[in-house]
Image (tube, helix red, strand yellow):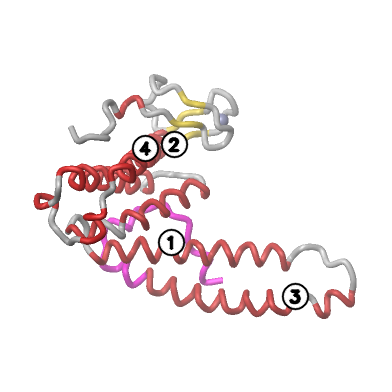
């Protein structure tokens, strides 16, 4: 077992994404969906366990990270022992996030998952662990998600109640310009993402919140 690897992954704990109550890892985890004992919200166990495992492994991998991972393009077998451990742990985290994203995660957790993927996708292709195409997909998904969030935040601000007629007429021209720019960029980025998706079979069943970019 690699240094830093989790001794017993079954004991990874996770919390209800709605209320933060810690879920007993020995609870009836055979069911795919599990009602939170505190708030009753339905929890997708596969997604929560996979994401919790991914986050823990990601942090372990970061602790083990060496400059070699960023400076060289060596294959796993050619790396120094600590770099090897780090790379293997990043790969485990990556696999867990993929599993989590094939199940239902709340929007905030989806963001965490995509952030982790975008970070790990900077490392794995250097060492031939995933394809450059796959790495580009995660980077592009992260860019789209961030732009989408900025667009939605701006939409919300522009739809706040308008206090006065005069204000309405002159209100926030820079926000409107920014919204226009974001909308255009989003459509462009979404198109790039769709092009990547055509060549990546695994994305077919990913449960990532999308689709508002067409606006
Ligand atoms: Zn709960």
Residue farthest front in this picture: 67
Q: CA distance from mark 4 to mark 3?
A: 43 Å
Q: Quadrant of the C terminus?
A: bottom right
Residue that label 1 marks: 142
Q: Return the mark for residue 44.
A: 2
Report the front residue among 98 and 74.
74
Report the front residue among 83 and 210.
83
Element assignment for label 4: helix
Tell me if residue 178 is in the magenta stretch. Answer: no
Span colored in magenta: 194-215
Relative to 2, does residue 69 appear above or below in the rendering?
below
Element assignment for label 3: loop
Element assignment for label 2: strand
Q: Earlier in the sequence, mark 1 or mark 2?
A: 2
The percent position of residue 9, horizontal first and vertical second, equals 30, 29
Q: CA distance from mark 4 to mark 1?
A: 21 Å
* Mark closer to the observer (1, 2): 1
Q: Residues within 10 Å of mark 4 (few under 14, many from 20)?
A: some
Q: Quadrant of the N terminus?
A: top left
Element assignment for label 1: helix
Image-based side of 209 in relation to 19, left or right: left
Q: CA distance from mark 1 to mark 3?
A: 28 Å
The percent position of residue 208, horizontal first and vertical second, equals 43, 54
Residue that label 4 marks: 56
* Mark closer to the observer (4, 1): 4
Q: Earlier in the sequence, mark 1 or mark 3?
A: 1
At 68% from the left and 74% from the top, the residue drawn is 175
Q: Earlier in the sequence, mark 2 or mark 3?
A: 2
Residue that label 3 marks: 172
Q: Residues within 10 Å of mark 3 (few under 14, many from 20)?
A: few
Within the image, what quadrant is residue 20 found in? top right
Relative to 139, does residue 35 appear above or below in the rendering?
above
């Amino acid at each position: 077992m690699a240094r830093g690897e989790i001794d017993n992954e079954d004991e990874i704990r996770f919390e209800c994404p709605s209320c933060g109550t810690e879920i007993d890892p020995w609870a009836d985890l055979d069911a795919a969906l599990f009602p939170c004992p505190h708030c009753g919200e339905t929890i997708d166990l596969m997604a929560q366990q996979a994401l919790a495992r991914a986050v823990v492994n990601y942090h372990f991998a970061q602790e083990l990270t060496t400059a070699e991972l960023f400076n060289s393009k060596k294959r796993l077998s050619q790396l120094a022992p600590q770099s090897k451990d780090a790379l293997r742990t990043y790969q485990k985290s990556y696999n867990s996030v993929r599993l989590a994203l094939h199940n239902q995660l709340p929007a905030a957790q989806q963001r965490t998952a995509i952030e982790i993927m975008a970070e790990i996708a900077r490392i794995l292709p250097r060492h031939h662990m995933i394809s450059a195409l796959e790495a580009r997909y995660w980077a592009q998904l992260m860019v789209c998600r961030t732009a989408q969030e900025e667009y939605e935040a701006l939409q919300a601000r522009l739809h706040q109640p308008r206090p006065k007629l005069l204000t309405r007429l002159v209100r926030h021209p820079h926000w409107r310009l920014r919204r226009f720019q974001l909308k255009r960029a989003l459509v462009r980025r979404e198109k790039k993402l769709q092009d990547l998706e055509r060549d990546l079979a695994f994305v077919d069943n990913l449960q990532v919140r999308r689709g508002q970019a067409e606006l």
